[in-house]
Amino acid sequence: MVAEVYVAVMLSTALDDPLAIPYFLWDEPMTVAELRLRLRAGSSEKRVRLLAKLLREARDTDVWKFTTPGEVLREWPEISMRLGRRRDFWRFLFDRWRKAGLLDGQQAWTASRRFPRRVFPS
């Protein structure tokens, strides 16, 4: 019989420390530096998966330490399918930002559709 070994990982809210393991990566420990590298240089599929995890698990104010609204909106159709119950929160937030003129020209939502529709050429 093989015994399973569990290693305790210290999760952190110190998101400016490149060696810290972010609290929202509790199920996939990696340092802040590793996360930044994977978001910058990973395959499209891996980046979308990590962006979705970030939007789903991190505090909304912490999300912007790792990405931008423009990047999230560019990948929204793929990200939104992975957000679960957080999808409506992010849709609401982006819609309010757009109505306030903070996202002009990036993305517009339609109330009757599940996913966003581009209203400006890409």
Image (cartoon, helix red, strand yellow):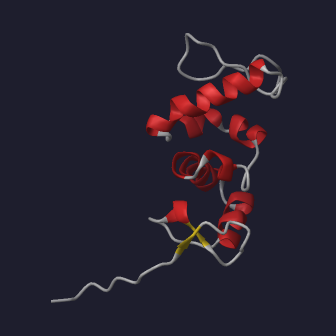
Foreground of the two, 101 or 37: 101
Residue at far top of view: 112
Q: Does 40 sit above or below residue 18?
A: above
Residue at far left of view: 1
Q: Residue at x 74, y 42 (%)?
A: 71
x then y, percent, for residue 19? 67, 78
x then y, percent, for residue 111? 58, 12
Q: Residue at x 67, y 39 (%)?
A: 75
Q: Residue at x 56, y 51 (%)?
A: 49
Q: Residue at x 55, y 10 (%)?
A: 112
Foreground of the two, 102 or 4: 102
x then y, percent, for residue 98? 76, 23
Quarter of the image with the C terminus in it: top right
x then y, percent, for residue 15? 68, 66
Report the number of discs: 0
Quarter of the image with the N terminus in it: bottom left
* Residue 78 position by quadrant: top right
Foreground of the two, 75 or 63: 63
Foreground of the two, 44 or 69: 69
